[in-house]
Image (spheres, grey):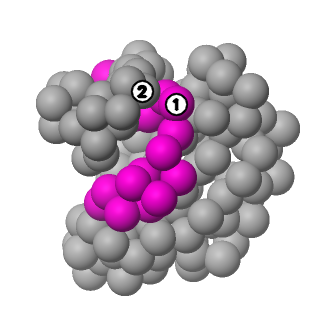
Amino acid sequence: MVFTNGCFDILHIGHIRYISRAKKLGNVLVVAVNTDSSVKRIKGKKRPLVPQDERASIVAALEDVDFVVLFGESTPGKLIKYLEPDILVKGADYKLADIAGSDTVAGYGGLVKTIPLVKGRSTSNIISKIRKSF
């Protein structure tokens, strides 16, 4: 099982390629999506733009995603301990040691990996571009 997580506020090509690469690492891909309250804590009071149930449904509709779960904490640490994925994945903007749950996964012999990001593609960049156009 491969596990990853994120806010997925405005789904873009970076998310699609990231999820596709994550799925190729194993047979089952579980994507944990931050709840609205956790996104606000992480990204600020103006986020998310898309409600949690819609974000979860959009992610679940992707061909490479097998399961979606919402989580309300700032990190998915508890969820990772519960699921014990074989592989934990985050974007390459994270250092392995800084990935929430990496110590847990490594502790039972699982792998922690990063996936390269699509340069210049992020939800924050898209939001900024939209705001500048008005």
Instruction: Determine which residue is flagged by label 1.
Output: 86
* Quadrant of residue 93 within the rendered picture: top left
**Residue 65 vertical position relative to residue 119 in the rendered view, above or below:** below
Q: Residue at x 74, y 42 (%)?
A: 65
* Quadrant of residue 119 within the rendered picture: top left
Q: Position of residue 82 (x, y in %)?
A: 47, 59
Task: Give 132 or 103, whichever is nearer the viewer.
Answer: 103
* Quadrant of residue 89 within the rendered picture: top left
Q: Is residue 78 magenta?
A: yes
Task: Give 4 or 38, whichever is nearer the viewer.
Answer: 4
Q: Residue at x 57, y 78 (%)?
A: 51
Q: Is residue 36 visible?
A: yes
Res 31 label: none
Q: Residue at x 55, y 69 (%)?
A: 70
Q: Residues within 10 Å of mark 2 (few under 14, many from 20)?
A: some
Looking at the rendered structure, the secondary structure element under dot 1 is loop
Left or right of 37 in this view: 58: right
Instruction: Inspect the image, locate mark 1, and give the three-letter code of the amino acid beneath it.
Output: Asp
Left or right of 75 in this view: 98: left
Q: Farthest residue toward the front?
A: 108
Span highlighted in magenta in the image? 75-92
**Residue 126 vertical position relative to residue 15 in the rendered view, above or below:** below
Looking at the rendered structure, the secondary structure element under dot 2 is loop
**Callout 1–callout 2 Cβ contact below 8 Å:** yes
Q: Position of residue 49 (x, y in %)?
A: 49, 72
Q: Position of residue 84 (x, y in %)?
A: 48, 45
Instruction: Determine which residue is flagged by label 2.
Output: 110
Instruction: Inspect the image, locate mark 2, and give the three-letter code of the amino acid beneath it.
Output: Gly
Sequence order check, earlier mark of 1 and 2: 1
